[in-house]
Amino acid sequence: MEESRKEYLVKGYIEGTATTSEREELLSWYRAEGNEARLSPYQSESEENEAKKRIFNNIQQQVKATGPSKSLTLSRLAIAASVIVIVCLAIFWSTNKGNSAVELATVTTKAGERKIIELTDGSKIWLSAKSSLIYPVAFNGRTREVTFTGEAFFDIAKDKKHPFIVHTANTSTRVLGTSFNIRSFTEHEDVVIALFTGKVSFAGDKKDVTLLPNNQIVYNKKTNLTKVLPIPDVSAILGRHNGYYEYKNVPAKEVVEDITRLYNLQVKVQGGVKDCTFFGRIKPGESPEKFLKKMAFVVNAKMTQKDSVWTIKGGGCNLK
C-alpha cells in the first residue's frame, strides 16, 4: 500500500470520517505487516487499560497540533496505526500468549434495515438501521470485544472471566452479562447508553463511570463530559429493538430523523415546528407516511409531498 494511502486511511479513522470499507482496508494492511501476533506487554488488565488511555490522549493532542493543512509524518503514522489497534480495536491483538490471529466479521445495516446477530458466546445484538458492528468470529482471549457505530440493543451472555467490551467513538462500555441499548451515530454529538439489567463500566476521555439499571449515560463527544440520568421511559427504549417506536416529549426534528433512518424515507422539517415536542407511537407494520401525517397534525404543521420527498412545515406547536 502506498504511504499516501496509509496516511489517508489513518487520518480518516482518527477523525471518525472513515467508511466501514476504509477501516477494514486499514486493519487488513496492519495485519499484513505482521502486527497481529503482537502480545500485550502489561502485567495486568488495569495497567494495560491505563496505558491505552495515556497513549490515545497523547496522539490526539499531536493530531490537533498539526492543523488541518498539515499531514502526519511517517513516524506518527506508525504510532497512529498502533493506537488504532491498541485503543479502538483491541480485538485485533492476541491477548493471550500463543493465541492465533482473530478472524473478524462485519455486519452493517442500510436505512430501513434491521438485523439480529448471535455471537458464539451466546450474546445477542439487535442492530438498528444505518449501523455497523465489527466482531470476532470466535472469542479466544481474555476479553470479548466488539466495535460499533449506530444504534443497537445488546443482550450479553454472562461470563465473569471474560468481560464484554463495546468500543464506540472514543469510549468503551464494559460488562460481564447484562442488557443495554447504545446510540452512537457519527453525526450526533452524544453517545447514549441506557442500562436495563446488570451493571456496566463506561470509560470516556476524562473519567470512568459505573452505571446501574434504569439509568443512562449521556457522553458528549465534543466536550468529553459524561452525565448519568434516569432513563425517561424504559419501555419506549426496550421496545425499539422489536420494531415498536414510541415518543414522549421528543422534538419533532428528532422524530423525523428517526423515521427517516428506520424507514429509508426522505423527509424535511422546516420552520418553528422543528422544536415542537411530540407524543405518539408507530407500531410494527404501520405506514410511516401515515404516522408522519399524524405527527404533523398534532404539532400544528402541514405535510406535503413532491416526488419522493416529504416536507413538514409549520410555525406553531399547539392546536388552537
Image (spheres, helix red, strand yellow):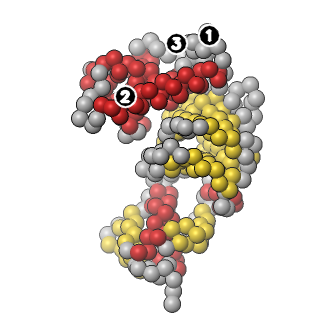
Of residue 17 and residue 204, the one placed in the foreground of this image is: 204
Q: Position of residue 220 (x, y in %)?
A: 51, 48
Q: Is residue 303 depicted above or below 129 in this figure?
A: below
Relative placement, left or right, of 122 versus 138 is right
Mark sitting on residue 248 = none
Circle 2 residue: 62
Gap between marks 1 and 2, in whole Å? Answer: 32 Å
Q: Position of residue 199 (x, y in %)?
A: 73, 41
Of the image marks 1 and 2, the number of the one nearer the N terminus: 2
Give the quarter of the image for residue 270. bottom left
Of the image marks 1 and 3, the number of the one nearer the N terminus: 3
Circle 3 residue: 38
- Mark 2: secondary structure: helix
Q: Mark 2 packing: few (<14 Cα in 10 Å), some, or many (20+)?
A: some
* Residue at x-position 67% and y-position 62%: 233
Q: Mark 3 packing: few (<14 Cα in 10 Å), some, or many (20+)?
A: some
Mark sitting on residue 97 = 1
Gap between marks 3 and 2, in whole Å? Answer: 25 Å
The amino acid sitting under disc 2 is Gln
The amino acid sitting under disc 3 is Arg
Q: Is residue 159 depicted above or below 48 in this figure?
A: below
